[in-house]
Image: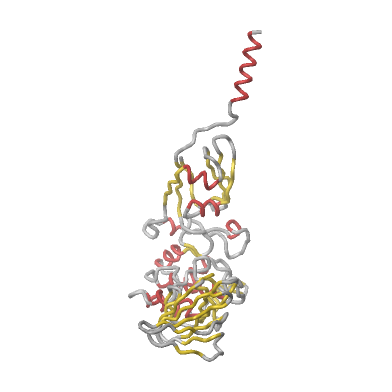
Amino acid sequence: MKKFIALLTALLLLAITPAWAAPVPARFIITGSGFGHGVGLSQIGAKGLALEGKSASDILGYYFPGTTIDTTPITQDIRVNIAHQSTYQAITGMNIQLFKGDLTTIPTPIPAGATLKFAVVGKVISPTITIKGAPTQILAPSSLFTVKWDGIVKVAGILLKYGSVALKVVAGKMEVTATMKLDTEYIYGISEMSSAWPTAAIQSQAIASRTYGLSRINSIRKECDCNVYNTIYDQNYVGYSKESEPTIGALWKAAVDATTGMSIAYNGAPINVYFFSSSGGTTQRSEDVWGTAFPYLTNVPDPYSLDLVLNPTYSHWQRVINQSDMSAAFGLPDIAMLSIDTKSVTNSALSISATSSSGVKATLPVGTFKTKLKIPSSWFQINY
């Protein structure tokens, strides 16, 4: 009987004891290298190769294997969204003309010193002209307005020198787009690399950015009335501020002019071009990041990204993530164990799993993990 009672007690204790229990760390330390998705042109790598005397075509041929530089003249305009789903905008500048509709209509000259304001009212845009000390002038509304100018204007916080600006009602809000020449005027305003870097590096960026625009020129996105956005979701367009930077702005403009008409091609067509800051020592294959393979978006050695002199901020980095932020990212009450489940051929993380103190497991793809926790790249290790 005593043995039976002892056995029964042991079984009861086993039944009420958690099947899996582990201590919960207060924080996790993530250490790694690189900044960005790692596909295509490494900007730090471009700088390193330029310092070694390589040309822009050498650099692009290295990071996009099997491609060529096409020199076919580029005559198309590109439409850049500079304000998405807006309800109000103001335009200031000199020698402004306002067109009700497109540029085929008769323009209304805007007085010097005036501010041209646009507000969405119902399904139309209502413009007004305001001059300090004078009554506000209300103009007839329309679903589309176009603005031209001479000199420099400020629209949506961006200084613009070239082309025209359209304001159009889309889905009840205002889409503001700047239209300009793709070959030069658009690239003058791209801010993706320091203009102080070696000439070959910034020329390679100019060609890559032109190719990016060229590959997207044939379709208008309905949601933005544009070919591209002005943000890093496409590429960072800042307008006249880029070429007007003191001293170095002229270097960027010269790099654009020196590469006029140049784009990156594969089998005679513009490539799907991508670029990023730096890697973990090797660039990524596109299929490992986005699931689609391209022969020219493959992995190549990128030792320059690990050079502390060339890349002081991201050659090696560390992030300390507290328990609450990490568990919130995975949707778990707490996290006792964290591990990298799968890795790419370049040793970058592909998926990360977390296990709670009670044994519940959750997995995130690396893109989601990086976004939620602001991790610079996919090349990292996990420490406790």
Residue at the bottom extreme, as displayed? 106
Q: From the viewer's perspective, is residue 23 above or below residue 185?
A: above
Q: Position of residue 262 (x, y in %)?
A: 52, 78
Residue at the front extreme, as displayed? 135
Q: Position of residue 328 (x, y in %)?
A: 52, 46
Q: With 171 as the anchor, is 108 left or right in this view?
A: left
Residue at 52%, 76% in the rendered image: 177
Tell me if I can see residue 208 in this picture.
Answer: no
Q: Which is nearer the eye, 173 or 126?
A: 126
Q: Which is nearer the eye, 237 or 158?
A: 158
Q: From the viewer's perspective, is residue 284 above or below residue 55?
A: above
Image quarter hosting the N terminus:
top right
Q: Which is nearer the eye, 265 or 215?
A: 215
Q: Position of residue 114 (x, y in %)?
A: 40, 83
Residue at 50%, 58% in the rendered image: 301
Q: From the viewer's perspective, is residue 20 above or below residue 368?
A: above
Q: Position of residue 237 (x, y in %)?
A: 47, 72
Residue at the top extreme, as displayed? 1
Which quadrant of the structure image shows residue 198? Answer: bottom left
Q: How has the structure been colored for display?
A: secondary structure
Q: From the viewer's perspective, is residue 76 above or below residue 342?
A: below
Q: Which is nearer the eye, 107 or 210?
A: 107
Tell me if I can see residue 94 in this picture.
Answer: yes
Count of marks overlaid on the render:
0
Residue at 50%, 71% in the rendered image: 230
